[in-house]
Image (cartoon, coloured by chain):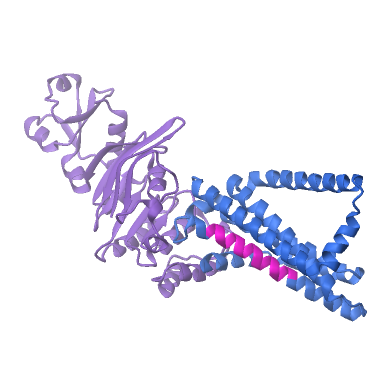
Amino acid sequence: MKAMLIKDVNLLKGQKQFFGALLVMIIIFSGMQSDPTFSITYTTLMFAILTMTTMSYDDFENGMCYLLTLPVSRREYVTEKYVFGVLSSLCGCTGASFVAVSAGYIKGIAYPWEEWTATVVSCMLLLALVLAVTTPIQLKFGSEKSRMAVFGVFAFGSLAVFVIVKLCQAAGIDMDEVMKSALIENLTTTAWGICITAAIVLAVSWLISVRILEKREF
Amino acid sequence: MLRLENVRKQYKGFGLDCSLEVREGFVTGLVGKNGAGKSTTFKAILGLIHVDNGDIQVFGKHPKELLPGDRERMGVVLADSGFSGYLTVNNLIPMLDRLYTKFKREEFIRKCSEFEIPLNKKLKEFSTGMKRKLQVIAAISHEAELLILDEPTAGLDVLARDELLCLLREYMETEGRAVLISSHISGDLEGFCDDIYMIDDGRIILHEETDVLLSDYGLLKMTDEQYHALDKSYILRHKKEEFGYSCLTDQKQFYQENYPGLVIERGSIDELIMMMIRGEK
């Protein structure tokens, strides 16, 4: 798996412009906003999407076919993608947090530890969802066709969330109160719940991805 | 080292039904026209497609049972696939170092420089020939026992082809190794392979040792009268021509001795393929 991680890191090294643009955006957002939640979430998501980019690069000119003749099992290839996705997103999250907290320090705005934890924990769930959805879709449909499929899944997901929120409002449930209770008053329980949910979602997605790649013909 | 027994794979409009063997110490060639089934055979061997029937054994194991350790014993070149174009050779070195316990880093770099392969250029900017050379160098740089080479000389000029074949001959000097190679350039195979399989429409139509192919097989050219008077016991294929008939035989000497008036040519592997595919039985 180390060889595949080295390959993916090298693939990302070619994305200097992307990282430069991302850094500029984080600095601008951190300078303009007092709440760094958006910067951290946005960066983590961008890093999660990079996993999808490395799969597109692997697939470039039918490259996946050759990759699987190397001493790498299909299961190992899939596992590496999830490990890489989680590790790169954690790096993104850490980097964005560092920039955001530093900007807050310079501006004299304190960023409470609990608020940061709530943001990071929410990011982890979002990251798990992005990885869990995009990885099997990309392995199944390839880099070209998967874009539409991923767009469709996330559009459907957003619609589902919107409907749930509306239904809750109709039932008289105050969503702001629910979020406040989950992310501030019961942060530890929520954090554990999110971590366990994320782990389960990723494990199920990993199983599906392994099955897809083992069945795929080149 | 490698055996395929009645391996079948059915696609829409094409079916593979192939048996072949690659023995230790042998360089085995697979020839056939485009779309004959060469690449499908290679993909079946490498476990890149699922076969419908038959048995494939690589180092005594089915391709799906091959562990990464077994795959380390193989070197592969594919006609339509390679390392990601977004990597450079310098990016590949640490990756190959991790993948193969016997990877010879210095030798790999030396050979890249010998074949004028840039280390810092993205592979997508490489010419087809450079990509092929890189794949062959990567395939032989980790002491593989079995090379599976699908069109390794495609896109190379005469000099580069010769250099590459020299490299492969050097590779075969070590005992316990074997090569399965496909090429549409018959000259490469004539001078390099110990035996040759000919594939057409997914089926092996001929298997022969190269020496026998070149010494015993021949093309007979004759008029209609000569053809009708000919003993056809050793004629594999015949084809109507403007001047009369062309016939392919695997007993050239028989016709040389018994029909001194016939034009008998040695026949290159290209001509042999043409006759085997286009001639009638």
Residue A117 image-quadrant placement: bottom right
Residue A100 versus residue A42 in the image, above or below: below
The majority secondary structure of the magenta stretch comes to: helix
Q: Residue B48 at what x, y percent from top left?
A: 45, 48
Residue A25 visible here: no
Residue B258 versus residue B7 in the image, above or below: above
Q: Residue A142 at what x, y percent from top left?
A: 60, 47
Task: Report the chain shown in blue.
Answer: A
Q: Residue at x 74, y 48 (%)?
A: A154
Give the magenta part as a residue range.
Answer: A77-93
Q: Residue B230 at what x, y percent from top left?
A: 13, 24
Instruction: Say how many tags the image has.
Output: 0
Query: Quadrant location of the C terminus of chain B?
Result: top left
Residue placed most toward the observer, A194 or B166 = A194
Palette colour of chain B: purple
Residue A202 versus residue A30 in the image, above or below: above
Q: Residue at x 84, y 44 (%)?
A: A163
Q: Is-magenta flag for residue B271? A: no
Residue placed most toward the observer, B230 or A192 = A192
In the displayed structure image, the side of residue A202 where residue A181 appears, left or right: right
Residue B216 image-quadrant placement: top left
Q: Residue at x 68, y 44 (%)?
A: A149
Query: Quadrant location of the N terminus of chain B?
Result: bottom left
Q: Residue at x 87, y 67 (%)?
A: A29
In the displayed structure image, the side of residue A210 where residue B255 appears, left or right: left
Residue B112 visible here: yes
